[in-house]
Image (cartoon, grey):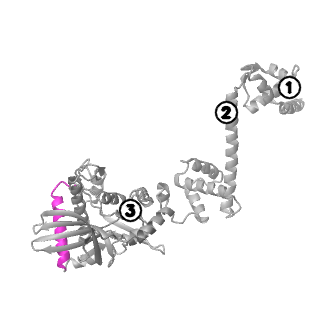
């Protein structure tokens, strides 16, 4: 009868399960591990029980060994392999890790559910910090980090395996802003200053200007030309016409006299590399108390500067170039738009434009491989409105750009001739040259693809994008660390 057979098998199975559960498999393994590598199942059970085992007892022992998988392995139908101590230790450690991971996954699942219901207050800080950090890492790098990978496993349980879902959860929980800048988080850009940096900035802000060994140039008509919203003014211009000569004064904010290697601010600036101008905010390389106040060449304020005197004859031949430590006072703060207006009626600005355009054309006589694309400026207002505008390369912007290029190239020559250590910028010729790109936007983009990367070196080399044999940058020490470093060397 089939039912009787099934009942008998069921009874047999239950009996063997009871026998299996009664075995202490660790006890027999501890005896055998020092004696042998293999043993017959019947012999092992007999050794454990101290009597000849029944078929059910042998079957129960095999079940126990196969279920446990740590101490014995079935090598042949009736032969057991005794696992070595070293391998058992490894198995046990692995099992512990698996149990710990399972526990962590369960913990994560409960935490995320609590986060969804906004009830995480009762969680210990270390658990909250761990899982919030893990969720952030998942949003940023998905499963490419250990914590992100763990979070990914938990999130898949909850059908939340897509980063955008987790981002929304973190926004709802008040951990992320709706417009959180994920690229800043990915690059680990330091968006704040340490307590030590702020203390140093406070001390520097109170330091008096050393007037010794500085040339007083406060009598000059000195101007700044920048965008309307600019607050960190790091360059200014003056101009004099004396008999048959012109004198250009390019004033650069003096930062290196206050900021030196060894300071936390110096190290912080090195890490940041530059000020970040984003559509919705600014992350300055230096604290605002320095970048927007102490060092900024603001109107009607006495400021220390590094001034570059450029002496020209009336034919615009260079007669001399001299960097000097100076004291200046900006007389007028002008915008690009205002200077564009003045260029049509003010002889001073007309003369400045004429001079800098002359040097621009001289550069362009050489082999220059530059691609000029429209500049799009995106701003986000405090009310969230997004403003997009095209920035035209107007005469005033060209004037300032050429003033800085001239200063940088003459400084590079000065550094080289005087054997002052310097970092020079250069750019090899393009890998391929596309013809007739001037009025073709597509060809400009194509040429851009073939432009060689600019290079930094301790020796000068030709810059194909500017048409110059010598080039460095030091005209923005408030905003760029490399410029600060070059100012320090000079």
Q: Identify the element where label 3 is drawn.
A: loop
Could you give the CA–CA distance between mark 2 and mark 3, rounded to whole angstroms?
56 Å
Res 121 → quadrant: bottom right
Kindly check if marks 2 and 3 are in contact, taking CB atoms under 8 A apart as contact.
no
Viewer-closest of 433 and 29:
29
Considering every residue shown, the one lying at the far bottom of the view is: 345
The part of the chain drawn in magenta is: 346-368
Report the number of discs: 3
Which quadrant of the figure contains the C terminus? Answer: bottom left
Pointer 3: what residue?
A: 259
Pointer 1: what residue?
A: 56
Q: Residue at x 19, y 79 (%)?
A: 346
Position of 325 relative to 159 (above/below): below
Foreground mark, 2 or 1? Answer: 2
Sooner in the amino-acid sequence: mark 2 or mark 3: 2
Considering every residue shown, the one lying at the far front of the view is: 212
């Amino acid at each position: 009868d089939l039912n009787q057979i099934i009942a008998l098998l069921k009874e047999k199975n239950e009996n063997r399960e009871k026998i299996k559960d009664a075995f202490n498999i660790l006890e027999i393994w501890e005896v055998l591990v020092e004696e042998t590598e293999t043993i017959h199942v019947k012999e092992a059970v007999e050794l454990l029980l101290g009597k000849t085992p029944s078929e059910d007892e042998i079957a129960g022992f095999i079940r126990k060994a196969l279920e446990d998988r740590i101490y014995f392995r079935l090598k042949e139908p009736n032969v057991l392999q005794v696992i070595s101590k070293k391998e058992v230790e490894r198995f046990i450690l692995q099992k512990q890790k698996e149990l710990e991971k399972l526990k962590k996954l369960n913990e994560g699942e409960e935490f995320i559910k609590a986060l969804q219901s906004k009830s995480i207050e009762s969680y210990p800080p270390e658990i909250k910090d761990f899982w919030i950090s893990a969720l952030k890492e998942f949003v940023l790098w998905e499963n490419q980090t250990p914590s992100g990978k763990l979070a990914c496993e938990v999130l898949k349980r909850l059908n939340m395996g897509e980063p955008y879902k987790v981002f929304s959860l973190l926004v709802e929980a008040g951990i992320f802003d709706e417009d959180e800048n994920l690229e800043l988080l990915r690059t680990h850009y330091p968006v704040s200053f340490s307590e030590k940096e702020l203390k140093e900035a406070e001390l520097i802000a109170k330091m008096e200007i050393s007037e010794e060994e500085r040339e007083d140039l406060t009598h000059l008509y000195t101007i700044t030309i920048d965008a309307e919203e600019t607050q960190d003014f790091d360059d200014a211009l003056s101009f004099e016409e004396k008999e048959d000569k012109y004198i250009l004064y390019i004033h650069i904010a003096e930062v290196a006299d206050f900021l030196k290697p060894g300071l936390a601010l110096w190290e912080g600036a090195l890490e940041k590399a530059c000020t970040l101008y984003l559509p919705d905010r600014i992350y300055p390389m230096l604290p605002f108390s320095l970048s927007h106040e102490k060092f900024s060449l603001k109107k009607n304020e006495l400021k220390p500067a590094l001034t570059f005197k450029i002496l020209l004859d009336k034919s615009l031949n260079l007669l001399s170039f001299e960097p000097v430590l100076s004291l200046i006072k900006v007389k007028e703060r002008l915008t690009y738009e205002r200077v564009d207006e003045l260029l049509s009626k003010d002889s001073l600005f007309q003369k400045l434009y004429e001079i800098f355009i002359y040097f621009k054309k001289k550069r362009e006589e050489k082999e220059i491989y530059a691609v000029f694309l429209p500049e799009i400026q995106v701003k986000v207002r405090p009310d969230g409105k997004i403003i997009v505008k095209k920035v035209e390369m107007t005469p005033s912007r060209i004037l300032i750009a050429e003033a800085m290029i001239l200063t940088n190239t003459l400084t590079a020559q000065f550094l080289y001739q005087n054997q002052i250590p310097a970092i020079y910028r250069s750019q090899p010729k393009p890998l391929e040259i596309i013809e007739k790109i001037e009025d073709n936007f597509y060809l400009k983009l194509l040429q851009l693809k073939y432009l060689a990367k600019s290079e930094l070196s301790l020796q000068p080399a030709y810059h194909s994008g500017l048409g110059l044999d010598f080039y460095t940058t030091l005209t923005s020490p408030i905003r760029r660390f490399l410029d600060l470093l070059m100012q320090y060397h000079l």
